[in-house]
Image (cartoon, rainbow, N blue to C red):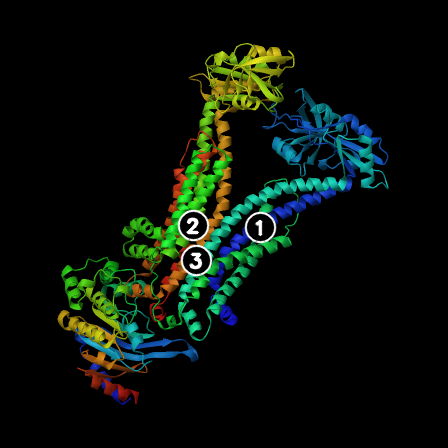
Amino acid sequence: MTITGEVGAWSARGDAAAAVVARGLTKVYGQGDAAVHALRGVDISFATGAFTAIMGPSGSGKSTLMHCLAGLDTVSGGQVHIGDVELTGLNDKQLTLLRRERIGFIFQAFNLLPTLTAEQNIRLPLEIAGRQADRDLFDRVVETVGLRDRLGHKPAELSGGQQQRVAVARALISKPQVIFADEPTGNLDSRSGAEVLSFLRTSVHELGQTIVMVTHDPVAASYADRVVFLRDGLLVSELVKPTPQSVLDTLMKLEA
Amino acid sequence: MLKTTLAGLRAHKLRLLLTSLAIALGVGFIAGTFVLTDTIDAGFTQKFSAAADRIDAAVTPAPGEASREVPLVPVAVLERVRAVDGVADAQGLVQGTSALMGKDGKVAGDYPTAGVSIAEGSLNRTLITSGSAPKTPAEAVLDENTARIRGFAVGETITVLDSEEVKHEFTLVGLFDVGLNQELGFTGAVGFTTGTARSMTGEKGFREIDVAAAEGVTQEAVRDSIAAALGSGYRVKTGKDYADAMARQNGADTQMITMGLLMFGLVAMFVAALVIYNTFNILVAQRTREMALLRCIGATRGQVFGSIVLESVVVGLLSSVLGLLLGYGLGAGALAVLTSVGAPLPSATAALAPRTIVLGLVIGLVVTVGAALLPARSATRVAPIAALRTQVEEHTFRAGLIRVIFASLFLVAGVGATVAALGMEAGQAALIVVMVGGSLVFLGVLTLGPVIVKPLGAFVGWLPARLFKVPGRLAVDNSRRNPKRSATTTVALTVGVTLMTLIAVLTGTMRATYSQKLDDQFPVDFMVQPQARDSGLPRALAEGLRTRPELTGVAAFRQTLAKVGKDEYEVGTFVAPADFRPELATGSIDVLKPGTAVVADYVAKELGLKVGDRLPVRTAKAGTVELTVVSTFDPEVADLAGVTVPDGDFERYFGAVGDSRVLVNARDGVSSEQARKVVEAAAQPYPTAKVASSTEVRGEFDEALDMMLMIITGLLGLAVLISLLGIANTLSLSVHERTRESALLRALGLTRPQLRWMLSVEALILGLIGALVGVVLGVTFGWAAAQTMTEEVAFRLPVVQILAFVALSGLAGVLAAVLPARRAARASIVGSLASG
């Protein structure tokens, strides 16, 4: 726990331009003796236009943190802000609308609806919201992820990497305030994974997108601008401009 | 393996329950049918054996004489029976007609009440429920029902017409229960002392003679001595045999009911089988990994097969037991309802016979296991390696060659049979061929289902997809993604809707055809008829009607039975204005001159007559006369007596015969109410004259048809209910399968209501596809069946009813989706994303 001292210093930083802010976030599963404290009071903020990776050993609470930040799961205590909206007071309908308007998702697997073509999958969030896709943006996004000739295919006819690229395009198309990616490369071979990650980084640097990514892969994390580390439901460390080696070293220190 | 299966079943109690319900409903209906009819049978047997305790022997006329009149035991026989050694008492039973007059001075009811004798002494089997039995010729009793409807109370005076239509007054001394006599229950009855009953009804003998044996004489002994005394020409039975015979006769009646109801039960079971088949198919698909894992750790194909079959055995057994309980309740309930509406049924506690239990269990088990066999076989094809795959692949479907060949064979054979039937002469044979053709086409559609369900889904989903935006579009896609599953689900509904539409088309067509016939045959406003169809009205009635200025076109018909050639036929005539022109096969009605006759087609055919032939008719007044046949007619077109002669001739041949029918029209400009009043006033002096208007006749027929339509639709409703369980089941299994998909949609911003909508619309589409196919099949084969029923059919499409069927099917589908949709919408996104 030697590293915890640093937390206060960096968590306050960048609040002015923060896309997502969490304060005193706690999450408890179950009750009484069976209670599991997944998050024990997390204070963190994610700067707009930055690519942040959340890392930590299994059971550290990194997925739970992401679910709570994205309004997919309810919190037990604390506050979450997405932009100027506080999530913790919202009901299911408001949360749904918030996700629809401001958040994009990329999951590890099962990102696409099997009945829809790639293009339909990309446009799905806009259609759910009843919005028209910006033609230029659509073209740019499709160009960025290199799916121009695959738009008419169903997911079953695409490779794993292509499927994830469709998922990336889908997350980008609605210009969300923040994209949450949960192990987006977990199911991919290293080449496809690298492709997907560089698309994510490109979208941050060229389109000004904010991305928060959960991963356990140091190489994946090294694509991010910043890596934060969780252990036992607490933020314990962070790295700016990480390399695979520096991420690995920090992890080793945490495991020890 | 047994333990694994049972543990799996225990883990999915709800799924088990839904599946079981489909079978339980079918078994319940079948068991309920047996419970109902068994109970009625048992009640009858019980009542008849009670009667047998009172009677030691019964004498009835020997059957076999082909006559239109009920055979009777002559009165003199009673004395001969009483004189036989060992006979303590003998009573003759009289049953004829003696019309009760209502308080309005007209005969009561559409049919004359029966006149019966109430036996005296120990042989009396009639149950007097209040007051006492008639003891003098001035006393009479009424059956309870008639007394209630006509408003007579014990102590009042009632007026009854004798067979000559002379009024007699009686003091009403009591009420009685008609018991199991359906005939008396239908017409109502007046009871007299035996002598009075004979004079009132004019019956020349007894329906039967009941005998009580003297002390110490056995039933067999008294039967034998009576039989010896009477010689041949009579049938003598012991009381026990008599009761058994009566019970058997009633048993035959209930057997008809049983068969009829079982037909609906079989339809329900067929639908249930489809539901079970589909459910097991989906379960097997969803448990692919589970099966593969079992195979990985060493289970053989046989063991996997066995585990699925075992599961179906457990489901089948449980649901059959559930069905038997349900059936018992249904049977008892139906009995209670029937008794409360006054059906003449013996009271008895519902009986669950061993045969019912065995049949219910066997049917439930065989259908369930049978339907699970194919899914079980496909489970054995799961390769062990499937356990390692993370994602269950989508079930793409391609129409196999074999499927197409089979479907084509069914369709070609079915359409061929139907077309052939349309070319056949109208009648039962043609109808059966149409039904066979329809079944074959249905099988073809069933086989082809997965192929046609996709385009149909797109067609039916066109509007919902536009109306409900994203949820609607996703729903349409989902309904089409697994064509085999959707097809089986919808076909189950199609069965019910097809049959309902078929019945609706048939009744609608019958209504239109009848209405058209009525216009042809009863092109008049009113018809006056005697209450008893075989009696006549005084001719003065028609004369009186002719003099009324408000009325016109008064046509009076008379007829009587006479021996024509070898057999008895109706010989009749008519008096009508010149514009009454019944249509003949050749020539006009003017050809009917003295000494001639026109005959109906069937008479000409049976007697081998053609125009110009001579026809011997044995008359009452003029001996046997030879008539020249001058033309024939179709009795469906021209409503005349089988052999019709000129009016003058008829009078000469048969003397004064009353009018059997008088047709009357209102003159133009006279309102039907006013005309009715005039006709009623003219008929008032003749108590047996009943006035009917064409609208009334039509109304009665419509009512009867509506009733039939309602009952059949209600019985078919069960099949529809089962198919809805199927939709609910399929949907909830699909929801389970798509847990992660739903979670993804929710994460992307689909609200809970939208997710619920998506599933409701999917169910709506499934319901509509099923209904649409059903309507097309039902209308087509309803039309074909109608063509084969009679020659001239006025086809009518009951559009409103059919639209209602389609709308209700869609609505029912949406209802079936309520629970699965709620479950899907409630699921937590995070939990669902992690699952699977």
Q: Nearer the viewer, mark 2 or mark 1?
A: 2
Q: Nearer the viewer, mark 2 or mark 3?
A: 3
* Residue B178 in view in this figure: yes
Q: Answer few, some or many: residues within 10 Å of disc 1's Cα (few below 14, many 20 plus, some between 14 and 19).
A: many
Q: CA distance from mark 2 to mark 1?
A: 23 Å
Q: Position of residue B496 (x, y in %)?
A: 45, 47
Can you tell which quarter of the image residue A112 is in?
Answer: bottom left
Mark positioned earlier in the residue sequence (2 or 1): 1
Q: Is residue B6 left or right of residue A183?
A: right
* Residue A9 in view in this figure: no
Residue B278, label in figure: 3
Q: Front-most of A83 and B47?
A: B47
Mark 2, residue position: B493
At x 55%, y 45%, the residue is: B261
Chain letter of mark 1 equals B
Mark 1, residue position: B32
Q: CA distance from mark 3 to mark 1?
A: 26 Å
Residue B84, label in figure: none
In the rendered structure, which amino acid carries the disc numbered 3? Asn
Mark positioned earlier in the residue sequence (3 or 1): 1
Q: Answer few, some or many: residues within 10 Å of disc 2's Cα (few below 14, many 20 plus, some between 14 and 19).
A: many
- Picture layout, residue B676 above or below residue B387: above
Q: Position of residue B71 (x, y in %)?
A: 70, 28
Is there one chain holding both mark 2 and mark 3? yes
Q: Answer few, some or many: residues within 10 Å of disc 3's Cα (few below 14, many 20 plus, some between 14 and 19).
A: many
For numbered disc 2, what is the local secondary structure? helix
Q: Nearer the viewer, mark 3 or mark 1?
A: 3
Q: Is residue B749 left or right of residue B443?
A: left
- Picture layout, residue A192 above or below residue B826: below
Chain letter of mark 3 equals B
Q: Front-most of B761 and B100?
A: B761
Count of numbered badges drawn on the protein: 3
